[in-house]
Amino acid sequence: MKKHSARVAPLSACNSPVLTLTKVEGNSCIRNHCEIGMVGTRLPCGTATLRTPANSWILGGAELGDERPQESPAPTEVQMQGGAEVGGRGNRSCWKCSITQLKKFFWGVAVILCVCSSWSGSTQLAKSTFKKFDAPFTLTWFATNWNFLFFPLYYIGYVSKSTEKQSPQQRYRECCQFFGDNGLTVKVFFTKAAPFGVLWTLTNYLYLHAIKKINTTDVSALFCCNKAFVFLLSWIVLRDRFMGVRIVAAILAIAGIVMMTYADGFHSHSVIGIALVVGSASTSALYKVLFKLLLGSAKFGEAALFLTILGVFNVLFITCIPVILYFTKVEHWSSFDAVPWGNLCGFAVLLLTFNVLVNFGIAITYPTLISFGIVLSVPVNAVVDHYTSEIVFNSVRVIAIVIIGLGFLLLLLPEEWDVWIIKLLTHLKVRKKEENTEGNGDIGPGLQIKSRRVQPPKSTFTH
């Protein structure tokens, strides 16, 4: 028996051991494999049979790659040993991968609940705050100041998890490389950070101002359209891949906006509120697309530093606006003792929690689950509004909410979703054919043997 050994890379990213590929002369082989696909796919883990006319490959452990003496077992025994060794390793690898994915899923459920509760909680708390403190821009400014905590929180997590410890200054300098070779300069601050600070403040202000005009259910549902706006802007500006299903989702989002406007009879109060939410969703989409265009993708430390810089920009350049609004009595309150500091701090904490989960939750779970938590805040706000306000859930409003939610869910589909479905259907068809073939193969020999026993020899009929 001739054997040739070759090293191959692991089959998946589940920390499986490096396997050896051993070539064995024969007619058949058994290969035990564990394949892990992308998010949302589940590929088989077990044994598969591969037959070639002359040669076969056995995927086995490192022991199979060693030279054997001439008194080695027969090819069938070697194949069985290789299959057993690979079976043990493959099963262990698949078990580890299954445990990892299961943990990621349970973390995803926890993140969904936290995202949903923090987003809907901040929306409801802002609504109740405006009954005592009618100052949406001041509330936006106050909550944005808490962005200071992003980089310190990240550094605490970095120190607790990383094996290589760096001082805050060293970590800061390393994260500043995100802005270029020169780091964070004055020019970079005003060209790559200040525009995003303006968009951040504008997005939150328009959202909070809309809460004053319309109910929180409509606000949270309409804000889900920002994902459709991100797709449209990415398609136009970034030349992203065209996807028909996402065009359908964008059309559904626009139809939901129109139906939501019609639900209250096109009153000026509701039209203004809807326009404010759509403006907030648009600026949020512009923020995301410009970030990808100008800065690309960021690591966790770089994202934390960037959000902290937005807090610095807010303190240095936005503080003057609430002061002007106070003295012009556009946003005026009698005294600082009358300010509901508990509501303001609670809103800021919930908004900070939401942003932490959205930006860093992908470290423990899938991004799709995080986005799913945002759309779940719509029914939560609807239940709260049903018991705390006089909202009327007529058929037009319910259909509009369902259409917007459906469009949002369609946008969560991955780019290769159609390819995955085709592969899944093809795999199911092939597997069904193999099962039918194996079933026919098991019955066939028995029938042939029986027929041979029943039929007498042909030589008896020659006389």
Image: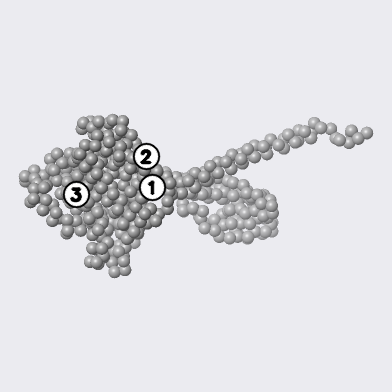
Label for residue 406? 2
Q: Can you identify the residue that label 3 sits on? A: 140
Judging depth in this view, the residue of 107 and 3 nearest the camera is 107
Instruction: Tell me the amino acid under the disc marked 2.
Output: Leu
Rendered position, 178 above or below 322: below
Q: Residues within 10 Å of mark 3 (few under 14, many from 20)?
A: many
Instruction: Tell me the amino acid under the disc marked 3.
Output: Thr
Measured from the top left, where is residue 156 in percent x and y? Answer: 27, 55
Given this view, does label 1 or label 2 mark the residue nearer the observer?
2
Question: From this viewpoint, which residue is outermost toward the bottom?
Answer: 182
Quarter of the figure with residue 216 = top left
Instruction: Answer with left or right where residue 94 lies relative to residue 256.
Output: right
Which badge, 2 or 3, comes first in the chain's sequence?
Answer: 3
Rendered position, 216 above or below 354: above
Instruction: Tell me the amino acid under the disc marked 1.
Output: Tyr
Q: How far apart are the two marked residues, 2 and 3, measured between alpha carbons?
A: 30 Å
Is residue 82 something one can see in this rendering? yes
The quarter of the rendered structure image containing the N terminus is bottom right
Label for residue 74? none
Which badge, 1 or 2, comes first in the chain's sequence?
Answer: 1
Q: Please report the residue visible at 23 percent of the width from the left and 32 percent of the height from the top.
A: 391
Circle 3: element type: helix
Q: Please report the residue visible at 63 percent of the width from the left and 38 percent of the height from the top.
A: 436
Label for residue 366? 1
Circle 2: element type: helix
Given this view, does label 2 or label 3 mark the residue nearer the observer?
2
Q: Residues within 10 Å of mark 1 (few under 14, many from 20)?
A: some
Measured from the top left, where is residue 233 in percent x and y? Answer: 34, 52
Measured from the top left, where is residue 301 in percent x and y? Answer: 31, 58
Question: From this viewpoint, which residue is outermost toward the left?
Answer: 334
